[in-house]
Amino acid sequence: MIAQTIQLALAPVFVLVAIGNIMNLLSTRLGRIVDRSRALQVRHGETVGVEHDMVVREMRVVDLRIKLVGRALRLLVTSGLATGVTVAVLFVEELLSADLQRVAATTFILAVGLMMWALVLFLRETQAASAALRIPDEYLEPDRRI
């Protein structure tokens, strides 16, 4: 019977692996965002006029990105905890011969829902990053034929 429980617990374990991979990706992005934030903070004191406004605009986007990644990471950690609880409930159910299927299903659904929410925040962060990376028209010189 314990072998069946181990097999049943494999699906949540794969979810844990996915959560870990997404967290790794997000923490790498967060590190790069923080580096950009520090560079912008230096430029903030060195700029004036239009250039200063551009720095402030980018700093606002960077601040939003930091918040979105932070929220996504918190959701993923919570999702990982819920997934761990799911695995524990499956084993407790087997060891105590108790009917905890609904508890296991609830914690697993919660874990997947939290992971999906985190992915939506990740999507928003990448959209914010893409929008901030658009090259201004004055650099593209759209009226100039090349």
Image (cartoon, helix red, strand yellow):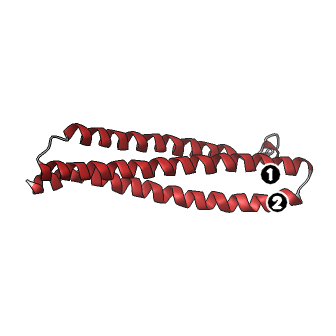
Distance of label 1 from label 2 (alpha carbons): 7 Å
Sort mark 1 into few (<14), some (14-19) or many (20+) by Cα contacts within 10 Å. Answer: many
What residue is drawn where x is 62% and y is 60%?
Answer: 32
Question: Does residue 29 sit above or below 54 in this rendering?
Answer: below
- Nearest to the observer: residue 82 or residue 8: 82
In the rendered structure, the answer to whether residue 14 lies left or right of residue 62 reads left
Q: Is residue 112 visible?
A: yes
Q: What's the amino acid at mark 1?
A: Val
In the rendered structure, the answer to whether residue 97 lies left or right of residue 25 reads left
Q: Do callouts 1 and 2 mark residues in contact (Cβ within 8 Å)? A: yes
Sort mark 2 into few (<14), some (14-19) or many (20+) by Cα contacts within 10 Å. Answer: some
- Nearest to the observer: residue 86 or residue 19: 86
Q: Which residue is mark 1?
A: 55
In the rendered structure, the answer to whether residue 45 lies left or right of residue 105 reads right
Secondary structure beneath label 1: helix
Q: Quadrant of residue 111?
A: top left
Say how many tags the image has. 2
What residue is drawn where x is 59% and y is 42%?
Answer: 127
Q: Which residue is mark 2?
A: 43
Where is residue 55 shown, x and y percent of the image?
80, 51
What residue is drawn where x is 68% and y is 49%?
Answer: 63
Q: Quadrant of residue 40?
A: bottom right
Question: Does residue 99 sit above or below 80 in this rendering?
Answer: above
Where is residue 132 shown, x and y percent of the image?
69, 46
Q: What's the amino acid at mark 2?
A: Arg
In the rendered structure, the answer to whether residue 78 lies left or right of residue 55 reads left
What residue is drawn where x is 57% and y is 57%?
Answer: 29
Q: Which mark is residue 83?
A: none
Secondary structure beneath label 2: helix
- Nearest to the observer: residue 143 or residue 8: 8
Sequence order check: which comes first, mark 1 or mark 2?
2
Q: Is residue 133 visible?
A: no
